[in-house]
Amino acid sequence: MIRIISIIAGSLISGCDAQYGVFREAYISDFIDHKCVERSLNSVNEAANIKYTFMDGDLSIVANTNKGFARHRYHDTFEEVNGFVSVLTNENGTQVTQFSATNNKPPPQKNISKIRPIMDKIETAISSHCEIEEFTSLVEESCKKVECE
């Protein structure tokens, strides 16, 4: 019986994909329309092939909503390095997450070195297009199994 439980537990653990790369998050206490994030991405010349996906929630959520949430995701590339921007809005405000990661193994360090300056430009553009003063100072970066200098 213990062997069966061990096999089941091992199967469950191996089904989880670990993500490695660079992750940046910022929390804003106000509602931020995801369209300004889209404008921000489009204003950064290096961000190419921008694709939008509505992930889940209420597509019609607006400022001053007491309940509900919406999650939007943008995918872009820079020299074949994938970048993502996720925008989650709810009654508490907005969480903007930027990341470039791979599953189960760290991405090449050269990809992280390429994408981080583009992430900086995107954050500066979000500050401007979404009218968030000092947005870049709200961003917290974490790096998993890669170097972020």
Image (cartoon, grey):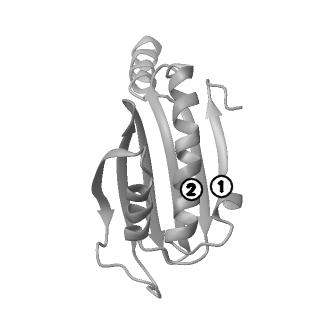
The residue at the point 42 percent across, 56 percent down is 41
Dividing the picture into quarters, in which one does residue 67 lie?
A: bottom left
Q: Position of residue 21 (x, y in %)?
A: 54, 31
Q: Position of residue 16 (x, y in %)?
A: 43, 29
Q: What's under tag 2, amino acid-wise?
A: Glu
The residue at the point 34 percent across, 44 percent down is 48
The residue at the point 47 percent across, 88 percent down is 64
Q: Position of residue 25 (x, y in %)?
A: 59, 53
Q: Say if mark 1 contacts mark 2, CB within 8 Å.
A: yes
Is residue 134 or residue 103 the one in the foreground? 134
**Secondary structure under the numbered disc 2 in the rendered image:** helix
Answer above or below: position of 92 versus 75.
below
Answer above or below: position of 63 versus 85.
below
Is residue 146 or residue 123 the one in the foreground? 123
Residue that numbered label 2 is attached to: 123
- Specify which label sits upstream in the sequence, 1 or 2: 2
Q: What's under tag 1, amino acid-wise?
A: Val
Q: Residue furthest front?
A: 45
Circle 1 residues within 10 Å: few <14, some 14–19, many ≥20: some
Dividing the picture into quarters, in which one does residue 10 lie?
A: top left
Q: Residue furthest bottom?
A: 64
Task: Classify residue 21 as left or right of residue 35.
Answer: right
Is residue 19 or residue 118 the one in the foreground? 118
In which quadrant will I find the N terminus? top left
Q: Position of residue 20 (x, y in %)?
A: 53, 28
The residue at the point 58 percent across, 66 percent down is 127
Task: Classify residue 110 as left or right of residue 49.
Answer: right
In which quadrant will I find the C terminus? top right
* Foreground disc of the pair 1, 2: 2
How far is disc 1 from disc 2 in space, using C-alphas? Answer: 8 Å
Circle 2 residues within 10 Å: few <14, some 14–19, many ≥20: many
Residue that numbered label 1 is attached to: 139
